[in-house]
Image: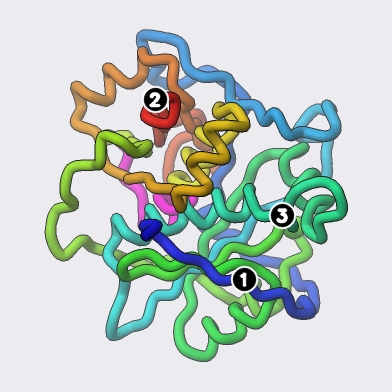
């Protein structure tokens, strides 16, 4: 049984409205780190870009994710992070996101041609039901549910998503997460960078996306067919230093919220997928 499940809905989108940005993060092209690692980092460029223009000159899009956080039963933090990462992968691999006539393909191309932005917001009750009525995919973890939507322009959010917030969301793990499965990719969080739950969910999504980009077609298909097994864990300081010299994909934050620009936040260890 795959470690996560997802369901698809395709309905008419709501009206556009300006979105209040929170928890906004960007996967940058390689840039100097204020505290540089002792070794090289992975080039962070998409093999799926359509237009090779300067990223900042292209129209800017954002990938919206909404986490279901009911007041009486919030999800565990680690499960929310892992579910958000899987939601990004499900969107990237969905037939509607791909060329050859996929209904979301044009938006996905435009998004990947510009800065790779993700925004995570929260919903409960009627807010969640309205979000589920919009075109997108809901991914369920053990306790978490995250709905991912096709990319939208920065100033063109559907009104039922634009009104949602993520600030003030605190999630905890009832008990420390178990060690990661050595046979599955791990998205390692920087132990020296503190992030809110929404910020960390977006960063985990970035890490999953960089791992996806770095794989060949065979490895991507195998990961998809297995249900995108992965773990999100905070690295021990010594392990983090080792990871920075391993040539793995590294997420560097653009510094819009919470942390300093250029901070390394996630390293994607996708080596188990190469056998």
Q: Residue at x 68, y 66 (%)?
A: 19
Few, some or many C-alpha atoms within 10 Å of disc 3 (few <14, some 14-19, many ≥20)? Answer: some
Please, is residue 9 above or below residue 56 in the view? below
Q: Which stretch is magenta? A: 192-202
- Horizontal and vertical percent for residue 8? 62, 71
In the rendered structure, does residue 34 fall within the stretch colored magenta? no
Which quadrant of the rendered structure holds the C terminus? top left
| Residue 257 appears in view | no
Few, some or many C-alpha atoms within 10 Å of disc 2 (few <14, some 14-19, many ≥20)? Answer: few
- Answer left or right for 75 relative to 31: left
Q: Which residue is mark 2?
A: 275
Few, some or many C-alpha atoms within 10 Å of disc 1 (few <14, some 14-19, many ≥20)? Answer: few
Q: Residue at x 75, y 48 (%)?
A: 98
What secondary structure is found at the residue carrying circle 2?
loop
Q: Which residue is mark 3?
A: 95
Q: Residue at x 43, y 31 (%)?
A: 273
Which quadrant of the rendered structure holds the N terminus? bottom left
Query: Marks 1 and 2, how far apart in space?
Result: 31 Å
**Between residues 218 and 48, which one lies in front from this camera angle?**
218
Q: Which mark is residue 8?
A: 1
Q: Residue at x 52, y 82 (%)?
A: 128
- Horizontal and vertical percent for residue 153? 77, 57
- Horizontal and vertical percent for residue 134? 68, 77
């Amino acid at each position: 049984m795959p470690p996560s499940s997802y369901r698809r809905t395709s309905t008419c989108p709501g009206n556009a409205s300006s979105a209040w940005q929170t928890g906004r993060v960007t996967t940058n092209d390689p840039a100097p780190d204020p505290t540089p690692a002792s070794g090289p980092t992975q080039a962070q460029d998409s093999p799926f870009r359509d237009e090779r223009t300067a990223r900042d000159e292209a129209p800017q899009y954002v990938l919206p994710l909404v986490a279901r956080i009911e007041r009486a039963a919030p999800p565990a933090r680690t499960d929310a992070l892992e579910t958000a990462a899987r939601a990004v992968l499900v969107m990237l691999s969905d037939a509607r996101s791909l060329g050859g006539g996929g209904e979301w393909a044009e938006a996905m191309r435009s998004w990947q041609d510009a800065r790779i932005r993700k925004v995570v917001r929260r919903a409960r009750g009627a807010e969640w039901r309205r979000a589920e009525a919009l075109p997108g995919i809901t991914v369920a973890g053990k306790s978490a549910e995250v709905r991912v939507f096709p990319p939208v322009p920065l100033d063109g959010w559907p009104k039922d998503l634009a009104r949602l917030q993520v600030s003030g969301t605190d999630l905890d793990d009832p008990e420390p997460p178990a060690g990661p499965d050595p046979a599955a990719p791990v998205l390692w969080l920087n132990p020296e960078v503190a992030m809110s739950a929404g910020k960390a969910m977006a960063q985990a999504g970035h890490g999953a996306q960089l791992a996806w980009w770095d794989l060949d077609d065979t490895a991507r298909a195998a990961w998809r067919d297995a249900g995108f097994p992965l773990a999100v864990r905070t690295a021990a300081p010594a392990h983090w230093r080792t990871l920075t010299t391993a040539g793995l994909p590294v997420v560097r934050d653009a510094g819009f919220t919470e942390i300093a620009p250029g901070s390394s936040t996630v390293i994607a260890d996708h080596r188990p997928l190469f056998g």
